[in-house]
Amino acid sequence: MNELIYQYWFLTNEDISYSKKSRLLEYFYDSYHIYRAGKEELMNTGLLEEIVIDEFIKNRSKFDLYEEYEEFLRTPFSFITMEDSKYPDKLRYIYDPPYGFFYLGKLPDFSRCVSIVGARRCSAYGKKMAYELGKELAQLGFVVISGMARGIDTCGHSGCLDLGGTTVAVLGSGCDVIYPNDNRVLYENISKTGAIISEYQMGTSPVALNFPRRNRIVSALSDIVIVVEAREKSGSLITADFALEQGKDIYVVPGRVGDSLSTGCNKLLSQGAGIIWSMEQFKKELCELYGSNYDSQKPILKKHKIELSNEQKQVYNLFDMYPKSLAQAAEECDMDQLRMLSNILELERLGMLFEVFKNNYVKQQ
């Protein structure tokens, strides 16, 4: 019988905890022998309580191997387990490795990966930095890893995709559950060139407890973890903690003192994290880490130069990375308000300004 049938059965089994599956695999060598194991053999492992074994054996007898596997094959999803040589080595040797995971799309080789993580409720500056980092990493040929959450995650994925790069989203829900729902288009775009992955069962809801656990996978698949904005207690710092345990490098985008979104980042800096003080500096350090010729792996796309009129330049220079209202801009500008607004709308059309919320704008480039 196809060995994948047994792997699928063991991956979908919910009687045994995630952390025990990899240890059972070490004991029995493969899922086929776990499926065939009797009660005494399972007791001898010392890994499972008798009540768990009884439930496991009862449910195993009800599982229709062929029917369940054939039904899964009719979906657009795939799976991979530790029994497959293509299972990422970066996950195989961490503490509490997942026995396997489901995915949608195509798995990259994970040889060069950087994760971008940060606050869901982030600032316009944080969004811009995450987006730009995603673009720069795509230009250098890195795979961008994140969690597809609102805010920083979304912008990191989007920047990478907009430059034709490969990005992977690690979900805290089932692979078939899109969360947040407003990231449906992003979910589809990621799966076209990269992958959506999850160790959770298909249909699993995005409950709060799932997210800290999935962060160990985000950090494990990455060579470097970038934290863009993080509060003092946040999921991003959990990812950073996993990264430190796994021996990964951490880089931080610094923030303003006193800003709650910067507290976690600045704390990481005080503990010795690398600092991203300019894109060129960061790219240079990446190339030093991965070889002097690594920056030539993927050609950097040249931006189309936009010619601005003197009035447009004057209005553009009123804004920066932090939101500024039209009323405040009008106070700083000696231009007629209608002309100023007309220039702002044109700059927005050109992608030079972005309205972060009603009547408040920031620079886009």
Image (tube, rainbow, N blue to C red):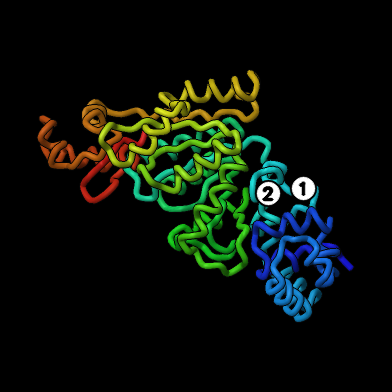
| For marks 2 and 1 on the same chain, the one whose residue lies earlier in the sequence | 1
* Residue position marked by numbered label 1 in the rendering: 86
Label 1 crowd (10 A; few <14 / some 14-19 / many >=20): few
Q: Nearer the viewer, mark 2 or mark 1?
A: 1
The image quadrant where one finds the C terminus is top left
Residue 127 shows up from this direction = no
Where is residue 198, by image quadrant?
bottom right
**Are dots 2 and 1 in contact, CB under 8 Å?**
yes
Q: Which label sits on residue 107? A: 2
Between 123 and 275, the residue placed more toward the observer is 275
Residue at position x 51%, y 67% from top? 205
Image coordinates of residue 151 in percent, x first then y, are 40, 48
The image quadrant where one finds the N terminus is bottom right
Label 2 crowd (10 A; few <14 / some 14-19 / many >=20): many
Residue at position x 50%, y 38% from top? 134
Q: Secondary structure at mark 1?
A: loop
Image coordinates of residue 224 in percent, x first then y, are 56, 34
Between 289 and 274, the residue placed more toward the observer is 274
Residue 289 falls left or right of residue 68: left
Amino acid under disc 2: Leu
Residue 121 shows up from this direction = yes
Where is residue 131, by image quadrant?
top left
In the image, residue 270 sits, relative to residue 78, either above or below, namely: above
Image coordinates of residue 12 in percent, x first then y, are 69, 67
Distance (Cα) linking label 2 and label 1: 10 Å
Amino acid under disc 1: Lys
Residue at position x 21%, y 31% from top? 318
Q: Secondary structure at mark 2?
A: loop
Between 359 and 310, the residue placed more toward the observer is 359
Q: Which label sits on residue 162? A: none
Residue 232 falls left or right of residue 149: left
